[in-house]
Image: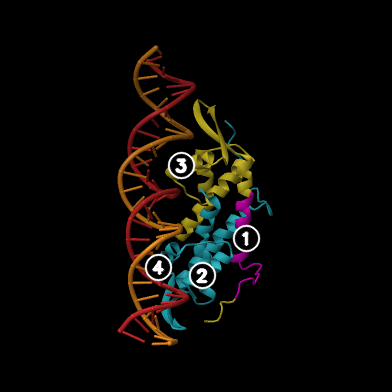
Chain colours: A cyan, B yellow, C orange, D red
Amino acid sequence: MDLVRELLRGAVPVHVLHHATEQEVYGAWLAEELARHGYPISPGTLYPLLHRMAAAGLLASTEHVVEGRVRRVYQATPAGRDALLQLRAVVAELADEVLPRHRRSTTVQRKGTA
Amino acid sequence: MDLVRELLRGAVPVHVLHHATEQEVYGAWLAEELARHGYPISPGTLYPLLHRMAAAGLLASTEHVVEGRVRRVYQATPAGRDALLQLRAVVAELADEVLPRHRRSTTVQRKGTA
DNA sequence: GATCGCGATATCGTCTGCCGATATGGACCT
DNA sequence: AGGTCCATATCGGCAGACGATATCGCGATC
């Protein structure tokens, strides 16, 4: 029942795609970066997520050897960038609906207690 | 693996609290309202969610009889309004980080390939 | 006053994904 | 060769999503 956590978790793929579009990323770095932004995510969640996103064709992965260690490095595919645009649109819409800032009053009044 | 759906679902409680803060709401109305905004949610998801949120003290419920039918009507408690503020802050932060609009460049460059 | 109709709510079985802990792997060092 | 260390992979248990189905309560009909 931690609503904040649920909301954050739904947003993790957005961050992943966001970063993977700008640069090559790898699991441990993403974990650290997400944690820095208040998105604690466990490896048991992150790695399977990356696998699923790769399997879905949103990320492409290659292995690099860096300082004597193997890293699986991901970058966004065109499909991943498309997905990012879609997700951004959802975020924008959500912000527009929920943040008091620019109230839209699109909300339909509840049909009378009738 | 439907990322949009995952993101939307994490945001459902935000909408619920948002509406339940402004007026009394009930399950079927919420379902319809959410669907209107592109948040399809099944009753098997929504009702248990409302129960959990009520159990967590975020919503208070009372039964009304309307047009010969019983409705369980919810409104946000003070704790629920607090939670809403918190969730809104998360949404604002997310929008700020992910939407290209006002780029913040707070993102730390990946520590060298190091 | 018992039955039916209906909107709304509640629940069930199954499945998917989360989580932290633990295991695995590969390159470098000694 | 064995040890070390970072990164990745996996496992078991658990929570929540989902659609379909059941239930509930009031009003109406006869």
Q: Which mark is residue B48?
A: 3
Amino acid on which disc 1 is placed: Glu
Determine whether A63 is above or below B14 in the image.
below
- In the picture of the structure, the residue carrying the numbered disc 2 is A30
Camera-side residue of B101 and B107: B107
Same chain for the residues under marks 2 and 4 in the image: yes
Give the CA distance from mark 3 to mark 1.
28 Å
Residue B79 seen in the current view: yes
Q: Residues within 10 Å of mark 1 (few under 14, many from 20)?
A: few
Host chain of mark 2? A
Residue B29 seen by the camera:
no
Decide which of tag 2 and tag 4 comes sooner along the chain.
2
Q: Position of residue A35 (x, y in %)?
A: 55, 65
Secondary element type, mark 4: helix
Residue B9 position, x and y percent, is 49, 52
Which one is closest to the eye, mark 2 or mark 1? 2
Residue denoted by label 4: A51
Q: Amino acid at mark 2?
A: Leu
- Please tell me whether residue B86 belongs to the stretch shown in magenta: yes
Which dot marks residue B93?
1
| Residue A34 is a magenta residue | no
C24 left or right of A30? left
Q: Are marks 2 and 4 in contact (CB under 8 Å)?
A: no
Above/below status of C26 relative to B63 = below
What is the chain letter for disc 1?
A: B
Span highlighted in magenta in the image: B85-108
The chain that hosts pointer 4 is: A
> Residue, x 47% and y 49% (percent of image)?
B40
Query: In 3D space, how far apart are the residues under numbered discs 3 and 4 (Cα atoms)?
Result: 30 Å
